[in-house]
C-alpha cells in the first residue's frame, strides 16, 4: 500500500506530465501567420503530387541530388531553392 506522501508525489508527477504533453502541441501555439504559411506549403506539395511533374518532388530527393553534384550550401536551402540551384525550374 502506498503512503500518502507517495500518492501525492505520484499525482504531482501525473499533473506535471500532462502539462508537458499539452505544451508539446506546438502547432497550436504557433502564430496564425506561421500556421497559414505551413498550410500553403502543404497545399503546394499536394499540388506537385497531383500534377505528377517529372522533377524530383521532395526536398530530400533534391537534397540527395545536390549532394551527388557537390552543391555548396545545400543543407541551408529549402525545396524551391534546391530546385532552382539544380536547374529544375
Image (spheres, rainbow, N blue to C red):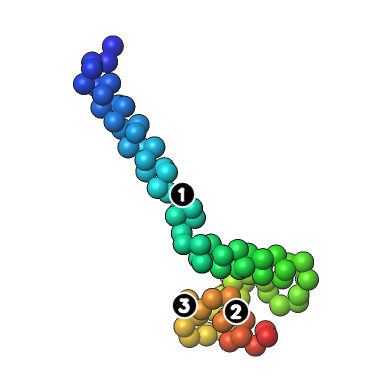
Marks 2 and 1 in Cβ contact (< 8 Å): no
For the residues carrying marks 3 and 1, which lies nearer the camera in this image?
1
Where does the N terminus fall, quadrant-wise?
top left
Disc 3: which residue: 76
Q: Quadrant of residue 44?
A: bottom right
Regarding mark 3 in the picture, which secondary structure is present there? helix
Q: Earlier in the sequence, mark 2 or mark 1?
A: 1
Determine whether 27 is above or below 14 in the image: below
Which residue of the protein is positioned furthest toward the top in this rendering?
Answer: 1
Q: Earlier in the sequence, mark 3 or mark 1?
A: 1
x 72%, y 71%: residue: 48
Residue 12 lies, in percent from the top left, at 29, 31
Disc 1: which residue: 25
Give the label on residue 80, or none.
2
Q: From the viewer's perspective, tell me whether residue 46 is left or right of residue 71.
A: right
x 48%, y 53%: residue: 28
Amino acid at each position: 500500500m502506498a503512503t500518502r506522501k507517495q500518492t501525492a508525489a505520484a499525482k504531482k508527477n501525473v499533473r506535471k506530465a500532462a502539462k508537458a504533453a499539452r505544451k508539446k502541441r506546438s502547432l497550436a501555439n504557433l502564430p496564425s501567420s506561421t500556421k497559414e504559411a505551413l498550410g500553403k506549403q502543404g497545399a503546394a506539395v499536394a499540388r506537385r503530387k497531383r500534377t505528377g511533374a517529372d522533377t524530383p518532388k521532395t526536398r530530400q530527393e533534391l537534397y540527395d541530388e545536390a549532394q551527388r553534384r557537390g552543391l555548396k550550401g545545400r543543407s541551408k536551402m529549402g525545396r524551391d531553392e534546391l530546385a532552382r540551384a539544380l536547374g529544375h525550374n
